[in-house]
Structure formats: structure tokens, C-alpha cells
Image (cartoon, grey):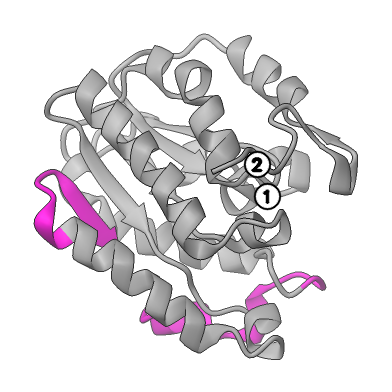
Amino acid sequence: MPVKIGLRHIDLWNESLEKQVQKYEEEQVEPGQIVFYGPSNFTRWSTKWEHRPLREEIVGASGKPCCVNRGFGSSCGEQQLYYYDRMVRPLAPSVLVYNCTNGNGGAFGYTWEENWELSQRVIAYAMTDFPGLHVYLEGAGISPKGKEKGDIEHRKECNKYLEEFAAKTPGVTYVDKMNYTPMHRDDIFVADGVHYNQEGYDIYAEFYREVLKDELKRF
């Protein structure tokens, strides 16, 4: 399979992934935390986009911050694999929350199957590097843009790949965002119909507090 997109720069939006990664690398991060890795639904969960940051919204049972946001740009599986060595491995996560849905991959010319193949390598590398790692694999959800494009049924079909993979892979849990009803509302999205507004991120945080409740007890 050929590389179909710039690994360090997204020409489509004139966006530098490398600069985002370099900025993350400047942070001092304690190893062994919960790392969120994926595209812009995580990227925008930050003060840069005028939202309360993920790190403050999802904390351990002690109240201690324990989540590290490594969402970057409009990345797809190709770039997530390329940057794994710099974005994930140095953090030595105890838990990896990974969004590997193909919204961006499709825009860059990757089929769902191609993007999923690349994403499985990210998971394999992480689980090889960190025995005992627990991976939470987030499936696609419902959004106004998805409904407008008539894409919801296709997303459901793609989510089945993730669910089946998690069912047969020890240490991997499928995160079913599609069937979480509070996230179906159109009014929790910004104008692009893709990304959450603050209320959307409030619901997203509540969702993940429940998903990660056993992990959060350790912090």
C-alpha cells in the first residue's frame, strides 16, 4: 500500500503536523498515564479551541490529573503510525485510548480497510512495547455531517471491525460511542457538524469517565 499523504504536512489544509508534535514534545510528562491518541476530536479538547482541556475534565479518583492528550491535527492512520514513536512510546502509557476511525483517511484517499490496517499496527506496536497495556478503541459516532452525507450506516459497519477485533484481542476494549444517546444531539456540535462545542465535550467527558472508571481508580 503506497503512502498517499504527506506524513508531516497536510497539503489539503496547509497544516503542519510536525509543528504540533514538536510542541507536545516540549511538555514534561510523567510516564504511566492514560494517553488519548487520534485526530481532531481529541485535538480540539483544549484551551486552544476555547474548551476546558481533557486533562482537567477527566481526573483520577484522587483528583489527580492522569490523562495526556495526544490528539493531533486531522491525522489518519498513516500519520498516527508514523508519529507513534514520538507521540506515544516516550509516554509509556498504562492505558491507550485510540480513535482510529477513517473520517480523515477517507478525505486523503484511504479506504476504511487501508486505514484500519495501519491502525492495527499502531495497536500492535503499543501492546508489544508495553505488556499489560489496556487499549480502548473508540468507534465512530453520530454527527450532523455524517447524517447529511448519509454515512451513518457505513460507520456502523466499520465499527463492527473494531468491536470484533476487541472481542478477540486480550487487553483491547471497544468503546461504543455510536449507541451513547446523549451524543446524538445536533446542538452539541459547532457549525461544521463534525466537532463538539463545549456542551458536547462536557458529555464526551462524562462518557469517558464511565468508560474509564476502573482505570481512574488507580490514580
Q: Residue at x 20, y 41 (%)?
A: 215
- Residue plotted at (64% across, 88% down): 147
The reply to whether dot 1 and dot 2 touch (C-beta < 8 Å) is yes
Task: Give the vertical position of 7 relative to 18 (above or below).
Answer: below
Farthest residue in the front direction?
1
Residue 46: assigned label: 2
Residue 30 image point, x, y percent = 38, 13
* Range drawn in magenta: 167-192
Position in image of residue 41 (x %, y %): 60, 54
Residue 59 visible (yes or no): yes
Residue at point 54%, 43% (across, down): 1
- Relative to 112, is 4 above or below? above
Rendered image quadrant of residue 205: bottom left
Which three-letter amino acid code belongs to the residue tagged 1? His
In the image, which disc is placed on residue 88?
Answer: none
Residue 68 or residue 174, whichever sits in front: 174
Q: Quadrant of residue 198?
A: bottom right
Residue 134 drawn at (x, y percent): 20, 39
Residue corresponding to mark 1: 51
| Nearer-N-terminus badge (1/2) | 2
Q: Quadrant of the C terminus?
A: top left
The residue located at (68%, 64%) in the rendering is 195
Q: Is residue 64 magenta?
A: no
Disc 2: CA contacts within 10 A as few (<14), some (14-19) or many (>=20) = some
Cα gap from disc 1 to disc 2, whole angstroms: 5 Å
